Image: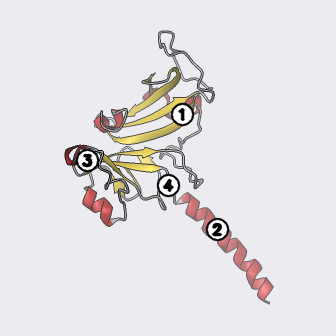
Amino acid sequence: MKNMLKMAALPLVLVFLVGAVDEQPCLTFKGLGPAQIGMSETELKQLGFGDPYRPADWQTDEDYAACHFLIKEVEYPGVRFMINEDMLVRIGIHPNDAGIIWQTLSGATIGMTETEVASIYGNWMKIDDHPYLGDAGSYLVLASSDWRYQMIFETATPDGGGEQSCSLRPQGPVAKKRVTDFRAGLAEAVSYIEGRS
């Protein structure tokens, strides 16, 4: 009888696990799950977000207020939440060791090729030069209809090959370049190359 109960419970467990994957929040222009652009740092800390690097002495209080990151590693591995003047302004998605696949509401994620991302967003997506990789990478840029928010997918070739000159940039997406990370939030903050710059 016990074995029959275990066998009957197995499909319920599988349905629960599949449901948990489906409930993974997706990155939008305005947030990821309960973390929404415009929230205060205090509100995020009340949700369990923290800054493990705050005790560091390499940053002045003014610099810290201007730009720092919060994390919540257990629930959001590989995700960094940028704070500027006590407000969440940007959310960055990076590779993680937990196997969590973060994606946008439309399904774009790390590892996709530029052509795959282009097939999702079409003409809505603009291709810009990568500030460090030259032709070996790109910025795939999306803007909200009011231009207040942006989303940027950074891409690179797997071998890192490519010229540092962008004079012969291809006119469209390149299949060999893959998304390495992506971010969304207020347009100005999303455009920062290295944190606040």
Which mark is drawn over residue 117?
1
Q: Which of disc 4 and disc 3 is earlier in sequence? A: 3
Residue 152, position in %: x, y?
42, 35
Amino acid type assigned to the residue bearing label 1 in the image: Val
- The Cα atoms of the two marked residues, 2 and 3, are separated by 44 Å
Residue at image x 25%, y 61%?
Answer: 42
Decide: few, some or many residues near mark 2? Use Cα within 10 Å; few <14, some 14-19, many ≥20: few
Decide: few, some or many residues near mark 4? Use Cα within 10 Å; few <14, some 14-19, many ≥20: some
| Front residue (pair 41, 19) | 41
User: Disc 3 on helix, strand or loop?
Assistant: helix
- The Cα atoms of the two marked residues, 3 and 1, are separated by 34 Å
Q: Is residue 159 above or below residue 27?
A: above
| Front residue (pair 167, 184) | 167
Describe residue 56's horizontal placement relative to residue 129 as left or right. left
User: Disc 2 on helix, strand or loop?
Assistant: helix
Decide: few, some or many residues near mark 1? Use Cα within 10 Å; few <14, some 14-19, many ≥20: many
Q: Quadrant of residue 13?
A: bottom right
- The Cα atoms of the two marked residues, 4 and 1, are separated by 23 Å
What residue sits right under mark 3 in the picture? Answer: 64
| Front residue (pair 180, 123) | 180
Residue 160, position in %: x, y?
58, 26
User: Disc 1 on helix, strand or loop?
Assistant: helix
Residue at image x 41%, y 49%?
Answer: 80
What residue sits right under mark 4 in the picture? Answer: 77
User: Disc 4 on helix, strand or loop?
Assistant: loop
Q: Nearer the viewer, mark 3 or mark 1?
A: 3
Q: Quadrant of residue 3?
A: bottom right
What residue sits right under mark 2 in the picture? Answer: 15
